[in-house]
Image (spheres, helix red, strand yellow):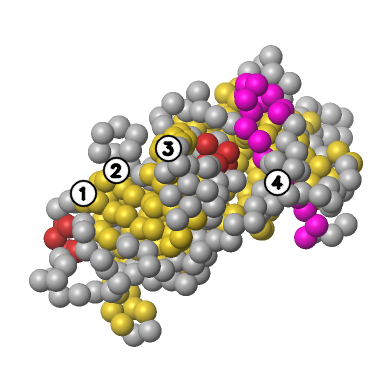
Amino acid sequence: MNKNRAVLLAKLEAGGYGVDPTPTTAANAIFCEEPDIEPLVKTLERNQVRQSYGNVLPIRVGEGMKITFKTELAGSGALGTAPHIGPLLRACNLVETINAGVSVVYDPTSDGDAGESITIWFYRHNLLHQITGCRGTVKLETKTNELGKLSFEFTGLYAGPIDATLPSDPIYPTVKPSPFRSASLAIDGYAAVVDAFSLDLANSISSRPDCNSATGILEYYVSHRKVSGEIDPEAVALATKDFWALWEASTAVAFTATIGQVAANRCVVAGPKVVIDDLKYADRDNRLTYAMPLMFTPNAGDDEVSFTFN
């Protein structure tokens, strides 16, 4: 079997948590890279005394599956139409708001129990894992003149593989992503000279054990999040921008960055109250810069970060 022959399908579970909505290659194919899968298994050791030494066969209990992959950050090509990664973002406890003909916005929510979930069908050549009840987290990474990449990590109910023929007809999005430039990146209103930008939603995924469930797990849910990020601005005179004063006082400031330059194919990442979490000197081709981790904090509830496709 060939490692690089793989197909990933993902669909929202409209019928309830863990109810497989049967994703299709025509509507639910995810254009992704570096997919990987890991079973979450509990090994029950059996330590009975016997008349002789030696191992006693353990019992393995499959509880969940973890699947990771990367996608390109791109819009739908139509204003007010959700991007193809919309279901993935919604399964990361982000609420989708569609403004017809204008934009699609994704904001976090703290309602982890009622958050949306997806079913993922992952074909690795002719082996198929049908993973229901997937909820997860996402990290964004990009650099100047490179593409924005989203790294997803989902956890769902255990699903061992079955034999299945690799689909030959998945339909992938045709909108091409745009490189990170003309980004209007600003922190506290200052347009710093920045090369790299990253953001981590950092959702914590927890399980609800249940003896009445087939896998012993009722569901996986988002139990917490701590949104963080990082930029690498060039160092300037304090009179131009005093990052040290902002850091020392833990001053919360606005942050924004735009990935993509074309309408209907760009994403504005914004935070109303961002705090510089640390401040260290670095360099970029011998030019003095800062390694600047950021902490995204709420302004009024669940609004510490937003993703606006417009």
Residue type at mark 4: give it. Answer: Ala
Report, in whole angstroms, how far the alpha carbon at label 1 lies from the one at label 4: 40 Å
| Residue position marked by numbered label 1 in the rendering | 252
Q: Nearer the viewer, mark 3 or mark 2?
A: 3
| Contact? badges 1 and 3 (CB < 8 Å) | no
Q: Do labels 3 and 2 touch, CB within 8 Å?
A: no
Determine whether, in the image, residue 231 is placed left or right of residue 27. left
> Which percent across, then down, holds residue 267?
44, 53
Q: Is residue 46 magenta?
A: no
Whole-angstrom CA distance, mark 3 to mark 2, is: 25 Å
Which tag is nearer the camera, tag 4 or tag 3? 3
**Quadrant of res 46:** top right
Residue 75 screen position, x and y as percent: 52, 52
Q: Do the residues labelled 1 and 2 touch (CB within 8 Å)?
A: yes
Left or right, 46 with reference to 226: right
Q: Where is residue 235 in the image (x, y as percent from the top left)?
A: 24, 74
x and y, in percent, of residue 285 in the image: 38, 84
Confirm or deny contact between disc 4 and disc 3 (CB under 8 A): no
Could you give the CA–CA distance between mark 2 and mark 4, rounded to whole angstroms? Answer: 34 Å
Looking at the rendered structure, the kind of residue marked 1 is Ala
Q: Is the magenta stretch mostly helix, strand or loop?
A: loop
Ranked by sequence position, the earlier of labels 4 and 3 is: 4
Q: How many marks?
A: 4
| Mark 2: amino acid | Thr
Mark 4 — residue?
29
The question of residue 16 being in magenta is answered with yes
Report which residue position mark 2 lands on.
297
**What secondary structure is marked by label 3?**
strand
